[in-house]
Image (spheres, helix red, strand yellow):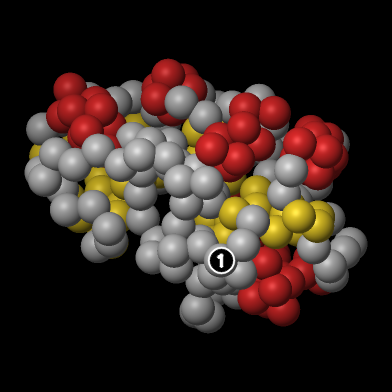
Amino acid sequence: MTAGSVPIGPASMSRAAEVVRRGGVIVYPTDTVYGLGCDPFNADAVKRVFEAKGRGSKPVPVLCSSASKAEELVVLSARALELARANWPGPLTIVAPVRMDLPTQLTQGSGKLGVRVPSHSACLELISLCGGWLTGTSANISGQPSARTADEAVRQVGGMVDMVLDGGVRAGKESTVVQVVGDTVTILRTGPVGVGDGLRYGRTS
């Protein structure tokens, strides 16, 4: 376990991806807040993410390197694809029916999963190095403020992870979360994206 952090860069991202491939858990910067990342197909690693957060029965979303990678995980309806095209990469998480076999703890047996393509170039590169998917729950103890800096993440969960990547101060506003079933869109958490506004977000550094 580590309580420190290292600047994000090519070498540290390669190391972090190796940690993930070996079943470890990392903290990494996204376009919104710092995230707790592991291989979403590794049940033991997912269990560690839940333990780090002190999380109970709330599912954990997955960040994807591309929309096509998201579609490998979940079934996106025509309406969901419309929202994805308008807002990915960006701070919109879409909850949709699961397509692949994933650990029950990740989805809490709901048969649904939240997916998102972040608007952050280094984050996308890291996710690609990890195989195209990385759990994307915020790097904080449940009920506590989301971490906007690596130091904030270290203070909350540093003792429960294997590596912390420092990418500077993040925006601090978590993504909008919507559930899409057919044409019906239900807002589960408000955030930067107003559903239906058609905005497209560019990548950040």
Q: Could you tell me which secondary element the residue under label 1 belongs to? A: loop
Instruction: Give the tally of numbered discs.
Output: 1
**Left or right: residue 24 compared with residue 183:** right
**Left or right: residue 133 compared with residue 178:** right
Residue at screen point 76% across, 55% down: 7
Residue at screen point 56% across, 71% down: 147
Q: Which residue is more in the foreground, 126 or 167?
A: 167
Q: Which residue is more in the foreground, 28 or 111?
A: 28
Instruction: Spot the residue most to the right.
Output: 1
Position of residue 93 measured from the top left corner of the image (x, y, whole percent) = 35, 46
Instruction: Spot the residue most to the front.
Output: 205
Residue at screen point 17% across, 53% down: 194
Q: Which residue is mark 1?
A: 169
Position of residue 74 measured from the top left corner of the image (x, y, whole percent) = 40, 28
Position of residue 87 measured from the top left corner of the image (x, y, whole percent) = 27, 38
**Left or right: residue 169 compared with residue 154:** left
Asked if 179 appears above or below 168 in the picture, the reply is: above
Position of residue 154 measured from the top left corner of the image (x, y, whole percent) = 73, 72
Q: Which quarter of the rendering shows the N terminus?
A: bottom right
Asked if 195 appears above or below 144 in the picture, the reply is: above
Amino acid type of the residue tagged 1 in the rendering? Val
Picture quarter containing residue 86? top left
Asked whether the viewer can see residue 27, the reply is no
Asked whether the viewer can see residue 163, the reply is yes
Picture quarter containing residue 159? bottom right
**Label 1: how many Cα within 10 Å (few below 14, some 14–19, many 20+):** some
Residue at screen point 62% across, 62% down: 168
